[in-house]
Amino acid sequence: MAQIDRRTFLRKGGAAAVGLLAASTLPAPVMAHSGEMAPTLQIAMGELYFRFGDGEHNAPIELAAGERQMVRLFNEGAAAHEIHFGRDPDLDGRFYREDLLGTEGEHDAHGFIAVMLEPGEASMILFQVPTTKRGEWEIGCFMPGHYEAGQHAPLIIT
């Protein structure tokens, strides 16, 4: 069976890949969701920025630990973008060494969640950050060159 990297998996599988990834690698409080629940937060992605609601590009955002968050993501840019949640970026591996929503695996296996959107695409994600993960985190885009050019923003879990 041929193996593919996570970026190819996400790009080819779209929303189904995100759902499968979420169901297979995330703890119970985290899941992809496409229901009718109104979003608690909207995050736009564009050329080298994230924007929360009507806020400034790459401005900090606060989320409460232990509460369900329905987040609507949309790519208003002209290029593909992705969003990861974590801290301690590994720019060679193109992921966060400590992931906010993924699982920690055995033998250096790294669990993660990321959503990749092509221009004009949108997605919804429902998650709950454990109360043990309060603190300073960030969101970032690990498409080649995007993080390095400034496409990351502080994420404060209260």
Image (spheres, rainbow, N blue to C red):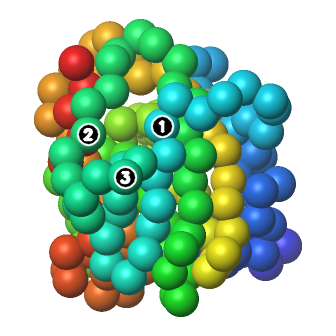
**Residue found 76% across the figure and 65% down from its top:** 14
- Helix, strand or loop at mark 1: strand
Of the pair 112 and 1, the residue shown nearer to us:
112
Q: Is residue 23 visible?
A: no
Asked if 13 appears above or below 53 in the picture, the reply is below
Q: Residue 56 at x, y = what percent?
A: 24, 59
The residue labelled by disc 3 is 54
Q: As shown in the figure, which amino acid type bears the numbered disc 2?
A: Ile
Q: Residue, x 67% and y 53% (percent of image)?
A: 123
Relative height, residue 9 to residue 17 (above, below) = below
Question: Which quadrant would the C terminus be assigned to in this image?
Answer: top left
Instruction: Determine whether label 2 and label 3 are within 8 Å by CB.
Output: no
Identify which amino acid the numbered label 1 is placed on: Leu
First in sequence, mark 2 or 3: give its number: 3
Assess disc 1: are there few (<14), some (14-19) or many (≥20) residues with their C-alpha within 10 Å of its C-alpha.
some
Q: Mark 1 or mark 3, which has the lower sequence index? A: 1
Q: Is residue 32 above or below residue 133?
A: below
Q: Is residue 147 left or right of residue 33?
A: left
Residue found at the very far front of the displayed protein: 54
C-alpha span from label 1 to label 3 = 11 Å
Quarter of the image holding residue 148? bottom left
Q: Which type of secondary structure does the marked residue at label 2 adopt?
A: strand
Q: Which amino acid type is marked by label 3? A: Asp
Where is residue 84 shown, x and y percent of the image? 41, 55
* Mark 2, residue position: 61
Q: Residue 41: which disc?
A: 1
Q: Nearer the viewer, mark 1 or mark 3?
A: 3
Q: Is residue 35 left or right of residue 7?
A: right
Provide residue 64's location: percent of width, then percent of height: 33, 18
Give the residue displayed 74% in from the left and 35% down from the top.
Answer: 33
